[in-house]
Amino acid sequence: MATVSVCQYHRGGFSFENCKRNALLEADINKLGFSSPAARKTGTTICGVVYKDGVVLGADTRATEGMVVADKNCSKIHYISPNVYCCGAGTAADTEMTTQIISSNLELHSLSTGRLPRVATANRMLKQMLFRYQGYIGAALVLGGVDSTGPQLYSIYPHGSTDKLPYVTMGSGSLAAMAVFEDRYRPNMEEEEAKRLVRDAIAAGIFNDLGSGSNIDLCVITKGKVDYLRPHDVANKKGVRTGNYRYKHGTTGVLTKAVTHLNLEVVEESVQTMDTT
Amino acid sequence: MHFTVVFSGLSGVCDRLRQARVRTPAAGSFSNVVSVKMATVLQFPASVSTFNNYNDLYPDWTQREVSTGTTIMAVEFEGGVVIGADSRTTTGAYIANRVTDKLTPIHERIFCCRSGSAADTQAIADAVTYQLGFHSIELDEAPLVQTAASLFREMCYRYREELMAGIIVAGWDPRRGGQVYTVPVGGMMTRQPVSVGGSGSSYIYGYVDSNYRAGMSKEECLKFTAEALTLAMERDGSSGGVVRLAVISEQGVERQVILGNQLPKFSTV
């Protein structure tokens, strides 16, 4: 008899077929006693603040792979356009690629309009892309910049919701950083005060959150100028060892010495040139 | 004009070995929606996510979806509508935004109050704003509030399995004056003189039912809304912050904010 197979029409929207396969593979691997590699996350503290002349963005520089620090000095403040920068927390690959894609699209858009891109445009593009992937792209972003409408700061969550606020923090250290902001933020601060505030907020994240660490990067964006300060503050210098495990020559006494010569002769010698034009 | 940008799937693009995240109902959501597509994910053992092993490093709230826990409300009066909302957005137990504006303009004299998933409601509101703006230009006149509500209903019903959105559409149009339409989770649409929504609404149904009278003035409606929202915010953990109010009428939109220390006081709170 002919078997009747029901063909399920793909009605659009995200296809979750691979998620089923992934979970089965994970279960199989776990049975064998291994664990699948953890995605590298930027555990992270990132934050931003709007001040009198523009915005200040800040980030720590630790990237973790599970409980191990994978990168002690990674750069989490990504370029979007000459007047817009974006800090990224969450899965490192996701934040990196997402910001690059939107940066590329925004440049094309800017060439098409003939104008400097707006922060709100970058925000729209990012939120629509992240919503399309329904939270599977683990990118939590702090987007800041100055455009013709003034300085703006947005926080963007992996599922695609955004908030426009005068000060924002994201990442695992965001609670520590937010505590600093809630205490000391004032509207219309001067540049030095704003930089100090962001530096202290990131420092709070670095010293109180295990997922954040190393140095503090800052990015100060004003109308017509961007100061990318990397590093702005080396908060965690590698210590100098006080002791030394090197032993002096002669510490171990030599009792006997035996030398065996290996008689080798050259059989063939050939040179292959590569065309490097 | 068909709106497909937001919901078009990119099958095959996301082909990587990633853990399917179990979509847990966010704090404050008022129903446990288990969709057909999500059901395939939920069959798997709870220890599927590798993130579970690093609870200290990545606290619970970094992996929860952002929800507008919420209390929202809208009241019709002669000549317009009064709408109100709290200002709290949560990810799990952390308040992601304590000054959220959940009263979103859809058109000049049409607003929507958003509750449920922040991402879903923002995306829907953006889509409907676009569609309504286009429609209004085609018509060359102000759109009807019912049209806006229909557009919301169309989207919320069609994608009901994928969305978590409870929306109240309210506004003024020249044909029927002030109107309030509610589009709860699931995609029903109905017109009501008073409507409350969100996780905090459960606590004030009694207050609203007993204190609403037909034919209240604008000031009475404002006081009624502010008091109802205050009571809900006091009892619901997912609602709080400030009370945002707006009055929509033929004259336009007047917005106001009632800060925490200026909220009406009740004897037990």
Image: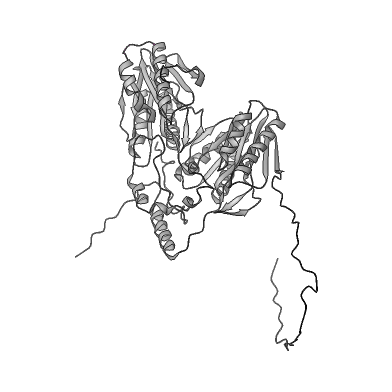
From the viewer's perspective, is A106 left or right of B216?
Answer: right
Q: Main secondary structure of the magenta part?
A: loop
Give yes or no for residue B216 being in the magenta stretch.
yes
Q: Quadrant of residue B173?
A: top left
Q: How is the image coloured?
A: one colour
**Residue A3's spot in the image, x, y percent?**
23, 62
Which residue is at 68% across, 32% downward? A194
Q: Quadrant of residue A254?
A: bottom right
**In terms of depth relative to the viewer, which is nearer, A110 or B172?**
B172
From the viewer's perspective, is A155 left or right of B80?
Answer: right
Which residue is at 49% across, 18% downward? B256
**Residue A157's spot in the image, x, y percent?**
51, 40
Image position of B65 with respect to B228: above or below: below
> How many numbered marks are there?
0
Give yes or no for residue B219 being in the magenta stretch.
no
The segment highlighted magenta reads B213-217
**Residue B155's spot in the image, x, y percent?**
36, 36
Image position of A15 with respect to B244: above or below: below
**Quarter of the image with the N terminus of chain A in it:** bottom left
**Quarter of the image with the C terminus of chain A in it:** bottom right
Farthest residue in the left direction?
A1
- Taking the image as drawn, is residue B35 in sight? yes
**Residue B136's spot in the image, x, y percent?**
41, 26
From the viewer's perspective, is B202 left or right of B16?
Answer: left
Which residue is at 78% across, 77% downward? A253
